[in-house]
Image (cartoon, rainbow, N blue to C red):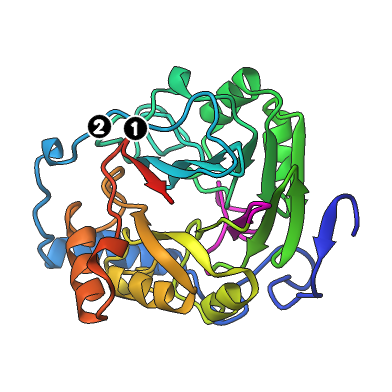
Amino acid sequence: MRHGVRILRAVTSHHRPGGGFRNPWVAQAVPGFGGLLKWMLVHRTTRPRPRDPDPSVFVRVTPAFARPRATPEQLTVTWVGHATLLVQLGGLNILTDPMWSERASPVRFAGPRRWVPPGIAFDELPPLDVVLQSHNHYDHLDDATVRRLARAHAAAAWIVPLGLAPFVRKRGVRNAIEIDWWQEHQISSLRVAATPAQHFSARGFGDRGDTLWCGFALRSGDGRSVYFAGDTGYHPEFGKIGERYGPFHVALLPIGAYEPRWFMRYLHMNPEEAVEAFQKLNARAMVPIHWGTFKLTDEAMDEPPVRARRAWKVAGLPPDHYRQLAHGETLVLD
């Protein structure tokens, strides 16, 4: 145990020689600038994209989480939108990848715009105990939201991957804890472990891989457990995560932002891969996330859950264990 962090094993293959981080499973997980130009200037101009639905198809419902906190025996999950969820576990209020801004962008006048207002209005948040930050991309780590949370929920502990603590501290966060893959941190009766993910980090042109990215496994003192994948492509560690931290009562898995596949395959799972990851995680139920909020890639906005349900059915999984939520909807798990 070091500084409240339990180190389970030495993992260095994702540490880049000379500093920073990399994906240990593929040599070049992130396409270069040439690939980006090919996507934007060639692929998008020569291949028709599927038509998006009217934004009105994405309904927003009234949340039903417990206020101010759930009892230690309760487990609730409320989808705010994209990768932002309010999880009530072990008597604590836990927020993932908080994002309340109108655009996922470094500027207010351009960039992907929110299709649906946040499922929980910012001022309606309950008192937060823990904030989990998976990585530093603009659709997951939002400058304005961090500052608002730091003021309104100053007592919350932020658990972040290596290298991200300076960012949130600079914006007012008082208690930021950095952990590496397979490391754990204990808050009250809650155990939080950072888990491997296949992605990358960058907020500009010269900082790619300078900070780490991860998912999180959560377990309360009475054994209730949640897996939050963050942002990830399919990788070979899902089975190991399930063995070490499962069984999970629910897995929160990204299913969107996957086309074109030649560009996105190492960064974001498609719905079929998300269902395959679920099967390896030793989880009971799945809540799909990372779709229907920001238009980031080329698939239609309403396509991911259609494909995910189809893959779920093909896999022969129990229909009622796929728990698709509307923005703001609360799932109560017994």
Q: Is 219 covered by the magenta stretch?
A: yes
Q: Quadrant of residue 158?
A: top right
Q: Position of residue 272 (x, y in %)?
A: 29, 74
Query: Tags 1 and 2 in contact by the CB under 8 Å rule?
Result: yes
Q: Residues within 10 Å of mark 1 (few under 14, many from 20)?
A: many
Q: Position of residue 240 (x, y in %)?
A: 60, 79
Q: Position of residue 180 (x, y in %)?
A: 73, 61
Which contiguous range is marked in magenta? 198-222
Mark carried by residue 61: 2
In the current view of this chain or complex, which residue is farthest to the right? 2
**Going 36% across and 31% down the picture, which residue do you hit?**
64
Relative to the observer, which residue lies in front, 65 or 2? 65
Q: Is 247 covered by the magenta stretch?
A: no
Residue 147 vs 277, above or below: the answer is: above
Quarter the N terminus occupies: bottom right
- Closer to the camera: disc 1 or disc 2? 2
Q: Assign a secondary structure to mark 1.
A: loop
Mark carried by residue 119: 1
